[in-house]
Amino acid sequence: GKREGREGSQIGRMRMLRRVWGSVGHSKGYRHRKRMCSIPQRLPLSTEVLTKADIAHFREEGWLVKDPFFEPAHLQAIRASLEEIHSGGRLANVSTEGDGKTKGEVRNLQICPLSPESDLFRSLPFHPKVSEAMHLLLCDDDTQSVTNYLSQAFWKPPSKGIGTSYHQDNAYFQVSDGSKGAALWIAVHDATVSNGTLHVARGMHKKGLLPHRRDLASDHHITCHDHIPESTEVALEVKAGGVAFFNLNVPHCTKRNATPNSRAAVAYHFVRSDFFRDRAFPLPEEADWKTPVVSGPQSSGGVNEYGLSCDTFEVSYVHLLIFRLM
């Protein structure tokens, strides 16, 4: 009886995998991307991913929430991949005991860069919706390209997780025009005020780069908290699978996780390729920092940077599902 039950379960799993693979491998979009691997190109600009109103809001306010954004199955894959990295001990505790040096209780876990950790995270900035959205937000036409500049993950432990203080990404990156770069912040779990969701300072991106000092609650962060009026603060609650976009000059932070559940997010940063500059921020010596062009005429689909096509998010998702089900 037990053997028959196991065999029936395995048959059920294989049937599910065939259905999933069929839906991925035989979809019109996948066939198109497969053909384009040898000569990677970007589809023409459209408003299927973002509306004209979305783009106008981003360019005026500096930020945009798009919720939902990822399909539930793709969110499941992102979450599963990050959980594996977390359970494998790859996330570092960057919180300190208030002196910027002494490590204590684990309260703020991060990893940077994230892309080298799995095929799925390497391919995620090439996801059609991601590359399309970043092109629409940062480029004026199809002659321009977008580069993925950095990737990170954040994990806030339950009850004791602390936030990351207000800062501008361009205080680290030092790009000549912060409006020509943007972050994509992906909610891996529901992000609410109670668990310390992302906050932005409305209108402060128009003031340029603010003064920053060391954040002594972290082993490396800097903060512009002293220059953020409380009246400008906006909490961006985002459901799991939803995203927030914000340009590199937008001051942003996260807050304490006061709930009994962990909260995690994944972030990718992008710059318009004609504003790309060499890295001005520190990374661990062993960090594998690559900056693939993900859209526009300069994009090779990852071939130039990795030696292989990275337009493989759906394939990585299916492989992860197979691993989980077997």
Image (tube, rainbow, N blue to C red):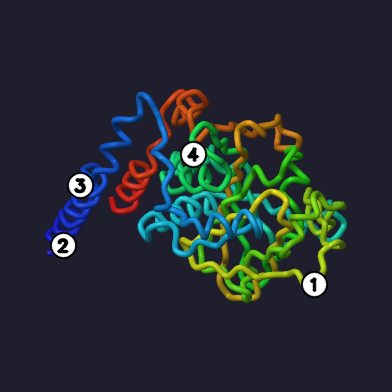
In the picture, measured across the screen, residue 111 lies left or right of residue 208, that is left
286 versus 131 height, above or below:
above
85 lies above or below 191: above
**Quadrant the N terminus occupies:** bottom left
Label 2 crowding class (10 Å Cα cut-off): few <14, some 14-19, many 20+? few
Determine whether the residue tagged by mark 1 lies in a helix, strand or loop.
Answer: helix
Q: Earlier in the sequence, mark 4 or mark 2?
A: 2
Give the amino acid type for the residue marked by disc 2 in the picture.
Gly
Q: Earlier in the sequence, mark 3 or mark 1?
A: 3
Q: Secondary structure at mark 4?
A: helix
Residue 127 placement (x, y as % from top left):
43, 44
Q: Residues within 10 Å of mark 3 (few under 14, many from 20)?
A: few
Q: What's the amino acid at mark 1?
A: Glu
| Mark 3 residue element | helix
Location of mark 1 (residue): 230
Q: Residue at x 75, y 37 (%)?
A: 176
Instruction: Give the mark nearest the N terminus, 3 or 4.
Output: 3
Q: How far separated are the C-alphas under marks 4 and 2?
A: 38 Å
Residue 75, located in which quarter of the rendered image?
A: bottom left
Image marks 4 and 1: residues in contact by CB distance under 8 Å: no
Location of mark 3 (residue)? 22
User: CA–CA distance between discs 3 and 4?
Assistant: 23 Å
- First of labels 2, 3 by sequence position: 2
Q: Gap between marks 2 and 3, in whole Å? A: 26 Å
**Relative to residue 88, is residue 284 drawn left or right?**
right
Residue 261 image point, x, y percent: 56, 71
Q: Which residue is mark 2?
A: 5
Alpha carbon separation for disc pair 3 and 1 = 51 Å
- Looking at the rendered structure, the kind of residue marked 4 is Arg
Does the residue at mark 3 contact the one at mark 1 (Cβ under 8 Å)? no
Q: What's under tag 3, amino acid-wise?
A: Gly
